[in-house]
Image (cartoon, helix red, strand yellow):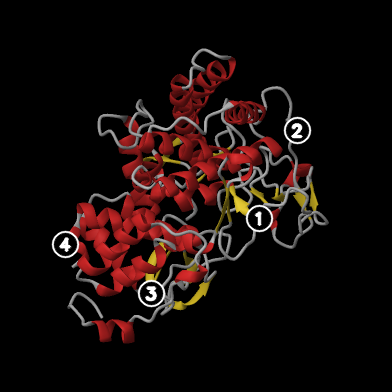
Amino acid sequence: MGAAAVDSAAVNTDFPVVRVAEAQRKFKSQTIEKVIHEVRTTVGNKEVGWLFENCFPNTLDTTVDFGVPDGKPDTYVITGDIDAMWLRDSSTQVWPYLPLCKQDKDLQQLIRGVIRRQVKCILLDPYANAFYKDSTRVSEWKATDLTDMKPGIHERKWEIDSLCYPIRLAHGYWAATGDLSPFDADWAAAMGRIVQTFKEQQRKEGVGPYTFQRKSQFATDSIPMKGYGYPTKKVGLIHSMFRPSDDATIYPFLIPSNWFAVNSLTDMRTLFREIGMHGKPADDAAYKLIEEVSTALTEHAIVTHPVFGEVFAYEADGFGNHTFMDDANVPSLLGLPYLQSSHFTGPLSVIHPEQRGYTVYQNTRRMLLSESNPFFFKGKAGEGIGGPHVGTEMIWPLSIIIRGLTSHDSQEMAHCLKMLQQSHAGTGFMHESFHKDDAANFTRKWFAWANTLFGEFVLKLYHEKPALLS
């Protein structure tokens, strides 16, 4: 297997059919199939072509439940092996399809349905991270979680990014299609709830309405200090009690998520202008939040590392305490350029070389991809960032993919692709994590976010660096 061309018989032998049979696929798109066929038959690296065929459509093949109740599209999206819809995962799983949906009305309607379903979830509880399709279903965590757990909620871990990703998806959908139809009164109400929740979690006027404790042997599954977290100095940053890994924060000011909030609120205001909400209370409140959080990030997110100079901290508390690390789940420090909208400018921009944030990010990147990051692991099977969620020495393909997507160096991109190609352990799919010395020692065989993101990376290379796929 490798760059050399192989005949169809060899393909059938070396790359067995592992994709779900056509009759069992949840959603079918001829546009997606054409892209798969083009990449599979064009690239010289036949194993990568096979992986792309399996991974890129995995969300559509296996995780979506689409319908049109009351004449409006509704799309419930599970993560894979967990029957629940995360606001984060559902956004990231369909994100790579956005460039194709303008020419595919069915695909466009599917994503419009995701936006509508996310609106329902946010209006049910903006502090929850995962939901059920059935609004009467009681969570398996209800007996162990001390929080306000309503029916229809799978898990209620407050994570800033849970509210950022639906904004990113909505803005990305509009940018790709020009369609404003999803942005009705319910959507506007959900955006108002997001702004309100962010303001509550600045905690300028008390601790706010959210508290969470779980009866568990894992410290990362519960929040100390009666469920409110460790003390912070109220500097304008937004408290996030959990990371996008669903692990508890150490210091509640999660820097990449606060940065993502500023970027997302900027996207929200763009949509507000498009639908005529410019100058309305929610728009004014979003503008004020952008100003406050941006100022606080400039003052509290950038710290001096003894080796790498000015870097972004992963977490802070406003008192001067910080963590030097990163987690594989996105938003991560490594993934900041991947999340930045093109219109997001100013000192915190990490993609404009003239801005301070660009230099700080480059320093941070070097730190994160070194032994100075306690969750960077390197072994016989590869190198990459993990996190506390599945323990030490476990590398997450998500981090390798994000490293490739945020790189401008062909050699580094090729290195990431090779590691991903060698990490699937014969399954034909990406996994949640794998051991640094043994790719066959992995977690979560069915993890749609990693699969679809891998497809996005391959497509980027196909269009921008095709020689790396030959």
**Is any atom of residue 315 visible in this view?**
no
**Quarter residue 420 falls in:** bottom left
At label 3, counting other C-alpha atoms closer than 10 Å, the crowd grade (few under 14, some 14-19, many 20 or more) is: some
For discs 2 and 3, the disc positioned in front in the rendered view: 2
Residue type, numbered disc 1: Thr
Q: Position of residue 25 (x, y in %)?
A: 49, 66
**Mark 4: amino acid:** Ala
Amino acid under label 2? Pro
Q: Relative to residue 429, is residue 72 drawn left or right?
A: right
Q: CA distance from mark 2 to mark 4?
A: 53 Å
User: Mark 3: which amino acid?
Assistant: Ala
Above/below status of 34 relative to 231: below
Label whose residue precedes the other's in the sequence (2 or 1) = 2
Residue 56 visible at all: yes
Q: CA distance from mark 4 to mark 1?
A: 43 Å
- Element assignment for label 1: helix
Question: Can you tell which mark lies on residue 381?
Answer: 3
Quadrant showing the C terminus = bottom left
Q: Position of residue 168 (x, y in %)?
A: 46, 38
Whole-number angstrom distance, CA of label 2 to CA of label 1: 21 Å
Q: Which residue position is annotated with label 2?
A: 209
Q: CA distance from mark 4 to mark 3?
A: 24 Å
Q: Pick whichever of labels 4 and 3 is earlier in the sequence.
A: 3
Query: For residue 8, which quarter of the picture?
Result: bottom left
Number of residue marks: 4
